[in-house]
Amino acid sequence: MGKWLERARQLEAEASPDTPGDGAIVPIVPIVQLAPSLPVPADIAQGLMKLRTMPIPRGVARKAWLDTVEDVNRLASSGWAETALGLGWTAIDLFGCEPPGSDDYYRNGLAVWLRRRPLLLLDADSAIADSGDRRRSVFNRKRNRAGAVLLWGLSVGKSR
């Protein structure tokens, strides 16, 4: 902890001359990149494009589908998906879902799990979302997702 204290003192000493009128110190906050920013692979990009225009799959509630597609778009457009891929996440980890007829929600990927909650943190093994009222929920990437399918691979069309 000594090194952190030394660094904090150094940051105080290097504080911007533009301190507020009340004499408070404005710390200089370094920008830390957690993972290399990688472009989304072509197969994922194609899947995301398909997802944006595909009809609601059989057996999926309309609101749940629309919320999931919104979360997928948010992950892709905000850079979270690129960061996750850079940390070793797979497309199934991010955009997978339980197969039709299954009730094993542990197979769902991050986008399905989010349910419109804001993503706060992501590392190589997990993601943390804000659940409101100062609560946080944790998504474990290391769960067995065997049998999960990508959202854009779900069957669409009329139910029988």
Image (spheres, rainbow, N blue to C red):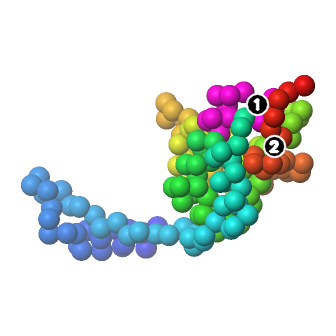
Q: Disc 2 on helix, strand or loop?
A: loop
Say above or below: 7 vs 96: below
Say whether marks 1 and 2 touch (CB < 8 Å): yes
Please tell me which of labels 1 and 2 falls first in the chain.
1
Residue 107 magenta: no
Closest to the observer, 136 or 50: 50
Per the rendered image, the range of residues in magenta is: 57-68
- Work out whether 122 lies above or below 116: below
Q: How crowded is mark 2: few (under 14 residues within 10 Å), some or many (20 or more)?
A: some
Return the residue at label 1.
Answer: 60
Quarter location, residue 8: bottom left
Which residue is at a point 90% across and 48% down the rendered structure image? 147
Percent across and percent down for residue 15 are: 22, 69
Is 60 within the magenta?
Answer: yes
Q: What residue type is labelled 1?
A: Val
Res 41 quadrant in image: bottom right
